Amino acid sequence: MQRMHRAGIVLERLAQRYPRPASALQWQSPWELLVATVLSAQCTDQRVNAVTPGFFHRWPDPESLAQAEQEEVEQAIRSTGFFRNKSKNLLATAQRIVKEHEGQVPDTMSQLLALPGVARKTANIVLSNAFGHNEGIAVDTHVKRLANRLGLTDAKDPNHIEQDLMPLFPQNQWGALNHYLVLFGREVCKARSPLCSQCPLYDICPRYGVPS
């Protein structure tokens, strides 16, 4: 089966399964989504959601965080892992947003990528969910795994995977596609024990890399 044909079936069936896809991260503004997405690296969404209410109570916007001490930020996010690097990047990002963007999270790919610690995955999530701009496809561990298992890419690098996926799906669905694959990866196409017998994509899936 050609990749384009398979991709169309994947999109159709997952859209039926998840009619209102959304991120598990809890946020109310572009700033909150940006912080939550940075904190979610190598951390569960549940843990991030447990940390962010207190974080946003103390630092509700870039202006307030820009004036914080790194040690107090580290303590606030310690349980999310890699807290020193995350706190350093968040402080630098807040300071740059205040200095260069009048305290507002920028809404273009190039401006987001210029923020410390922000790569394409984070930028795509913020652009799609907070601003409704689909400039690319956010590739996290779930998207990477499913894209390879479904034979939609042979690449291993997230940027290359993104470039392979973009021509296969309508641009207005790029943001939703990330949600579809993340949700499906958590519920059915799990890393170690995929539930192939319950999978609505079983008939079209080449099951590349599925544990025997």
Image: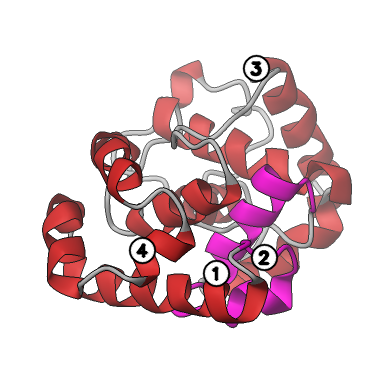
Classify mark 1: helix, strand or loop. Answer: helix
- The residue that label 1 is drawn on is 158
Q: Tell whether position 83 is magenta.
A: no
Question: Gap between marks 4 and 3, in whole Å?
Answer: 39 Å
Could you tell me the amino acid type at mark 1?
Pro
**Along the line of sight, which residue is nearer the eye, 102 or 192?**
102
- The residues tagged by marks 2 and 4 sit, at their Cα atoms, a distance apart of 32 Å
* Residue 128: percent from left, percent from top: 71, 49
Looking at the image, which is closer to me, 41 or 94? Answer: 94
Q: Are marks 3 and 2 in contact (CB under 8 Å)?
A: no
Q: Is 119 in the magenta?
A: yes
Q: Which mark lies nearer to you, 1 or 4?
A: 4
The quadrant the C terminus occupies is top left
Secondary structure under the numbered disc 3 in the rendered image = helix
Q: Is residue 155 among what the camera can see?
A: no
- SS of the residue under disc 4: helix
Sequence-wise, which precedes: disc 3 or disc 2?
3
